[in-house]
Amino acid sequence: MERLLVLVRHGQSEWNLKNLFTGWKDPDLTERGVAEARAAGGKLKDLKLTFDVAYTSALSRAQRTLALLLEELGQPDLETIRDEALNERDYGDLTGMNKDEAREKFGEEQVHVWRRSFDVPPPGGESLEMTAERVLPYYRSEILPRVIAGERVIVAAHGNSLRALIMDLEGLSPEEILKRELGTGAPIVYRLSDDGSIASVQDLKD
Ligand SMILES: O=C(O)[C@@H](CO)OP(=O)(O)O
């Protein structure tokens, strides 16, 4: 039985373009982000993939990415479940701050640690570990059972909420996840074994 799980980060957002820490704020996609979402649908269509259910966050940049992707794929009416458990990591006091200004203010290394480490939260925000504490239970209780049952599932979410899931899925160490980046609008196609472990991964980034 095929067990298909596709993860895709939202297309470029207006705050990505402005290089601002976004977290739980809700900017829209840029025109480039819209194009990336449609292109992601095209890549999946070229692979002749279709889905039985979709999951996304409570934030519109992910929801619109999914809707545009599904429209391109020819599945505009696919069952779609939205949950804030899949929201981006909360950047706390850094939210809305320009990332270059943050580097000037706090130093390159400190900002890198806040952005990409596993267990160091930004001031007033969530570490990746804290993000995983809401993403993983949701994945294990709501998403994984449907994948194991043979439903083809796509999840459109965010850079860090997906990094939290990928760290668990791929068994990455805190050192390995530090280096893992997700491109905007780049689907990752996982095929899972019956125990939920990975049988194959295909990264469709450009
Ligand atoms: O600002 C954010 O919410 C995230 C994703 O855009 O940024 P970073 O990639 O720096 O974690």
Image (spheres, grey):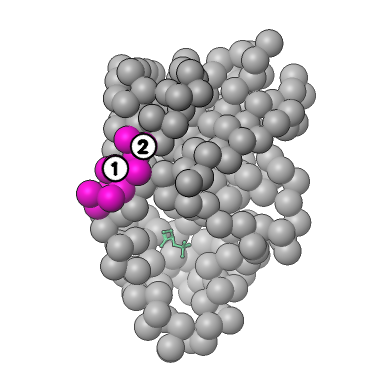
The residue at the point 48 percent across, 86 percent down is: 106
Label at residue 39: 2
The residue at the point 56 percent across, 80 percent down is: 110
The residue at the point 68 percent across, 40 percent down is: 169
Q: What's the residue type where badge 1 is placed?
A: Ala
Q: Quadrant of residue 150?
A: top right
**Magenta residues, start to end:** 28-39
The residue at the point 43 percent across, 88 percent down is: 104
Residue 165 point in image, percent of width and height: 61, 44
Q: Is residue 22 left or right of residue 136?
A: left
Label at residue 35: 1
Against 49, residue 130 (above or below) is: below
Q: Is residue 189 left or right of residue 89?
A: right
Q: Residues within 10 Å of mark 2 (few under 14, many from 20)?
A: many
Front-most of 21 and 123? 21
Residue 143 point in image, percent of width and height: 56, 27
Q: Residues within 10 Å of mark 1 (few under 14, many from 20)?
A: some
Under 8 Å from ligand 1: the CB of mark 2? no
Badges 1 and 2: C-beta atoms under 8 Å apart?
yes
Can you see residue 31?
yes
What is the chief secondary structure element of the magenta stretch? helix
Q: Quadrant of ligand 1?
A: bottom left
Against 85, residue 150 (above or below) is: above
Against 76, residue 40 (above or below) is: below
Residue 17 point in image, percent of width and height: 30, 63
Q: Secondary structure at mark 1?
A: helix
Q: Is residue 117 magenta?
A: no
Between marks 1 and 2, how big is the CA–CA gap? 6 Å
Q: What's the residue type where badge 2 is placed?
A: Ala
